[in-house]
Image (cartoon, coloured by chain):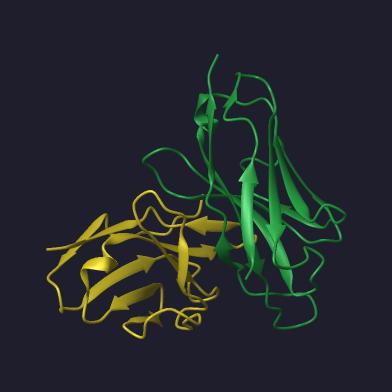
Chain colours: A yellow, B green
Amino acid sequence: SYELTQPPSVSVSPGQTARITCSGDALPKHYAHWYQQKSGQAPVLVIYKDSERPSGIPERFSGSSSGTTVTLTISGVQAEDEADYYCQSADSSNSYVFGIGTKVTVL
Amino acid sequence: QLQLQESGPGLVKPSETLSLTCTVSGGPVTSSSYYWGWIRQPPGKGLEWIGTIYYSGSTDYNPSLKSRVTISVDTSKNHVSLKLSSVAAADTAVYYCARAIRQYYDRSNYYPDWFDPWGQGTLVTVSS
């Protein structure tokens, strides 16, 4: 079955930049989306269609794509950004798949 | 502001059918722009897409769950329902409903749906 690969964890100091990657063979053909999930809460959409930011999401969140990898970048990380981050896309039959999630720790 | 609220039994016995309802407030489920999805998350684990429905009744299901899943919409009550049959312990999870945004790029093809917003989720435990 199709998989989206994410690093299990990323650690970053406040004010620095966090980059979270998501790799998958179908990503050159399908957009990816990103969700933030804080402890005990429902996921929140932070990036859609690789790089679009929904209204209300801070500008420090951005997304990019290159080949089989998409990247979520958090610039000027704040303590409130500590959360799990999931990428989501589709496989060749348009079934939706989520990555395993990346835990971002703010040191 | 659109809000979604999941409800249903928190405990289901093995081999029985899990039934949940997602009540939508702040907008109609019949909006032509949106679909409605169910996603689940086992305790301490990642997210798994269950399926998506349009108000017309058109559905897409995760192939790994398709034989056991039924998603329906009740436009008179403005809610979306999920039924999962023959449950086992592996179906223990927090179940979320979410609005799905679908954007077509030609007559029949569309980008992967994205989900926004989500309900708060409801924990369903499968145990005897």
Residue at 49%, 76% (x, y): give it. Answer: A28
Q: Quadrant of residue A16?
A: bottom left
Q: Is residue B103 above or below residue A36?
A: below
Task: Give coordinates of residue A86: x percent, y percent.
Answer: 40, 61
The foreground one among B73 and B64 is B73
Task: Give coordinates of residue A34: x percent, y percent.
Answer: 44, 68
Residue at 68%, 72% (x, y): give it. Answer: B102
**Residue placed furthest toward the top:** B128
Q: Is residue A35 above or below residue B59?
A: below
Picture mark count: 0
A98 lies left or right of A12: right
Residue at 64%, 41% (x, y): give it. Answer: B7
The foreground one among A23 and A74 is A74
The foreground one among B4 and A28 is B4
Residue at 70%, 27% (x, y): give it. Answer: B17
Task: Give coordinates of residue A33: x percent, y percent.
Answer: 48, 70
> In the rendered image, which quarter contains the C terminus of chain A?
bottom left
Q: Quadrant of residue B12?
A: top right
Q: Is residue A46 above or below residue B94?
A: below
B74 lies left or right of A29: right
The foreground one among B44 and A78 is A78
Task: Give coordinates of residue B108: x percent, y percent.
Answer: 78, 75
B18 lies left or right of B73: left
